[in-house]
């Protein structure tokens, strides 16, 4: 592996017995949880049994204690068999029970500064930031402005009077035919910027300017003439661009997340060091999952420790490396930085609006909704009906432990935190989780889906799903000439299996309120997820509406509809029972064209008994 992307740049392998660093090559796959499990059928069932014990006892430590005793029994049995056969005990235990002995652990390389030095450096940087912030209007350079979170940052920045200008880094775009690859059109930076503002209902807003650039290039690919201008006006760089593909290979993730961050950090450092620079701080948007699979301790805001249970994927791993780079630039070069770490980002909490996002949680919700639509539309033709029934039943099987808690956070809360970081120079030197303190379990999510989408999801224990259910389902679907569906289900399983197991990490929160000034209470996760389902069903048609301007038109009408409901009821629209919400929607919209029939407040019919929420 190329030395400039080798994990050994950030991580070292340590002997568990002596705490000495082992001079061995570290490969990326060794840092993922998949390298240490799913290699033996007994191990697979043991993990499944652990999940069952956690659910049955309600006590994770008790379940772990029981499994330790079972493991010790298996080790003792292996030793007896090994002595009888004259074999190596470790090889026998691995062959019989899948028991691997690990005499090492990984840790992030330590920087040369002690706690007192770090404290003094951060105090100094905070004071510098406060002094700089007094003299200038806020002018932001934003990377990732065309992404899911980036769009919401633009939308919110438009309403903040302290922000004088947002300069958005964006690339020209070539549109090609999906099948033939023929070039259909070219979009300039100016064209893309104008379309983006139209999509965000910000046409004609003079606060925004779009420039050509690429975060994977030195100086972020910005022309020298533009660089000269930026050095005298930019107060903040918000680095929001990143790869959010959980299944990307390591080199791709490293290039997008680590090298992209390095380029942005170097750019900000050059701005800060420029003569008479107004620069205040670099705001780095990371993820709270830089802490990996923590199952026994709180994922703290003030430190990043290599997880004993490893990382789920290369996205998490490389985002952790990027966080370490940000910390290094602060401590070694004196760059004023803020690190913001969102949890799993979903659509707006109040409306569910996602501006066309199809990733992460939206993906399975849309897949289930489409599967149900196919089943409903196949009435009459028994062959189509039978195939649709098989597809629907298989699509309803999802890897997840009912007790698994997911930390979903609405995009408007995340963007609010990012924008607030530019208004609070005291955030410099801090790592802040943009997460919630009321997580939602997989069982609660399935209950919402059953009520909102009329789909009964069957949760499959993640370990068994990976090793037994998914391979069988994939083979059946491939036999039915549904390879695309099989691949989609396999991808969903590989992505979500790690996030829907029992013992998910609990992220410390507090700095979002204390430092960023965000309000309490934090978002209600169940209500936000409910609106995600309603939005994806009615507005996005389960991912079928892909034209960004058409979706923007729909979301604007949808927002007005939600406003009217809440003005009339005095409650969040998500608190309405699903049947009552659907009745109001049908009375207010032509569902075929998604045009308004009449204001929602004109609908005065009595509500059915009971409300959710």
Image (tube, rainbow, N blue to C red):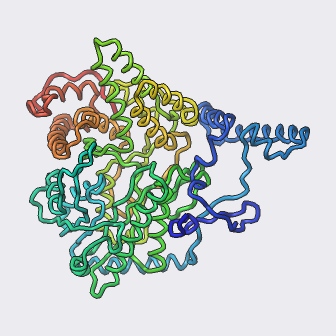
Q: Choose top left, top right, bottom left or bottom right for residue 12.
A: bottom right
Q: Which quadrant is the N terminus positioned in?
A: bottom right
Please, is residue 93 above or below residue 479 in the view? below
Camera-side residue of 15 and 506: 15
506 on left or right of 573: right
98 on left or right of 395: right
Q: Which quadrant is the C terminus positioned in?
A: top left
Say which residue appears at 31% left-offset and 79% top-offset: 271
Q: How many marks?
A: 0
Question: Residue 55 in the image: x percent, y percent?
Answer: 58, 33
The answer to whether any part of residue 156 appears in the image is no
230 on left or right of 58: left
Camera-side residue of 449 and 474: 474
Give the residue at the far bottom of this rendering: 275
Say which residue appears at 83% left-offset and 37% top-offset: 77
The answer to whether any part of residue 292 appears in the image is yes
Say which residue appears at 17% left-offset and 64% top-offset: 208
Please, is residue 231 above or below residue 574 in the view? below
Question: Residue 577 in the image: x percent, y percent?
Answer: 29, 28
Question: Residue 72 in the image: x percent, y percent?
Answer: 78, 41
Camera-side residue of 479 and 333: 479
Q: Choose top left, top right, bottom left or bottom right for residue 591.
A: top left
């Amino acid at each position: 592996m190329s030395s400039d992307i080798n994990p050994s740049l950030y991580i070292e392998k340590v002997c568990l017995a002596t705490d000495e660093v082992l001079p061995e090559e570290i490969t990326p796959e060794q840092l993922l949880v998949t390298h240490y499990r799913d290699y033996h059928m007994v191990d697979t069932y043991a993990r499944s049994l652990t999940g069952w014990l956690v659910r049955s006892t309600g006590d994770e430590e008790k379940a772990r204690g029981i499994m330790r005793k079972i493991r010790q029994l298996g080790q003792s049995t292996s030793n007896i068999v090994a002595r009888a056969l004259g074999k190596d005990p470790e090889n026998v235990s691995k062959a019989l029970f899948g028991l691997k002995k690990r005499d090492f652990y990984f840790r992030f390389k330590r920087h040369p500064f002690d706690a007192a030095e770090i404290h003094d450096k951060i105090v100094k940087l905070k004071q510098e930031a406060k002094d700089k912030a007094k003299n200038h209007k806020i002018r932001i350079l934003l990377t990732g402005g065309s992404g899911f979170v980036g769009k919401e940052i633009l939308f919110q920045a438009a309403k903040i009077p302290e922000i004088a200008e947002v300069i958005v880094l964006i690339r020209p775009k070539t549109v090609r035919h999906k099948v033939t690859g023929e070039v259909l059109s070219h979009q300039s930076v100016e064209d893309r910027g104008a379309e983006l503002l139209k999509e965000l209902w910000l046409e004609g807003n003079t606060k925004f300017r779009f420039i050509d650039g690429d975060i994977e290039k030195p100086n972020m690919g910005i022309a020298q003439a533009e660089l000269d201008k930026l050095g005298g006006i930019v107060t903040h760089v918000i680095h929001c661009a990143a790869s959010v593909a959980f299944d990307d290979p390591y080199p791709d993730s490293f290039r997008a997340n680590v090298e992209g961050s390095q380029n942005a950090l170097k750019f900000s450092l050059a701005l800060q060091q420029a003569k008479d620079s107004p620069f205040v701080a670099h705001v780095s948007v990371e993820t709270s999952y830089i802490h990996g699979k923590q199952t026994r301790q709180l994922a703290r805001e003030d430190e990043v420790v290599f997880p004993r249970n490893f990382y789920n994927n290369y996205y998490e791993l490389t985002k952790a490396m990027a966080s370490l780079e940000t910390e290094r630039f602060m401590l070694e070069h004196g760059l004023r930085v803020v690190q913001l770490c969102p949890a799993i980002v979903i659509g707006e909490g109040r409306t569910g609006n996602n501006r066309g996002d199809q990733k992460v949680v939206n993906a399975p919700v849309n897949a289930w909704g489409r599967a149900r639509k196919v089943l409903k539309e196949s009435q009459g033709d028994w062959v189509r009906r039978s195939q649709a029934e098989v597809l629907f039943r298989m699509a309803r099987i999802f890897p997840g432990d009912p007790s698994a808690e997911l930390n979903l956070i609405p995009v408007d809360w995340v963007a609010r935190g990012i924008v607030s970081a530019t208004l609070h120079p005291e955030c410099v030197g801090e790592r802040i989780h943009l997460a919630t303190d009321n997580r939602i379990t997989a069982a609660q999510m399935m209950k919402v889906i059953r009520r909102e989408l009329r789909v009964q999801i069957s949760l499959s224990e993640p370990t068994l799903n990976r090793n037994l259910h998914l391979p069988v389902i994939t083979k059946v679907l491939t036999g039915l000439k549904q390879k695309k569906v099989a691949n989609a289900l396999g991808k969903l399983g590989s992505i979500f299996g790690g996030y829907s197991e029992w013992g998910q990490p609990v992220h410390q929160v507090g700095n979002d309120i204390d430092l960023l000034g965000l309000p309490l209470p934090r978002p209600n996760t169940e209500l936000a997820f409910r609106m995600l389902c309603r939005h994806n069903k009615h507005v996005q048609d389960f991912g079928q509406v892909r034209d960004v301007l058409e979706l923007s038109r729909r979301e604007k009408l949808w927002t007005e509809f939600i406003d009217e409901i809440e003005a009339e009821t005095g409650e969040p629209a998500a608190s309405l029972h699903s049947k009552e919400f659907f009745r109001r929607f049908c009375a207010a919209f032509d569902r075929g064209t998604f045009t308004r029939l009449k204001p929602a407040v004109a609908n005065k019919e009595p509500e059915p008994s009971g409300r959710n929420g």
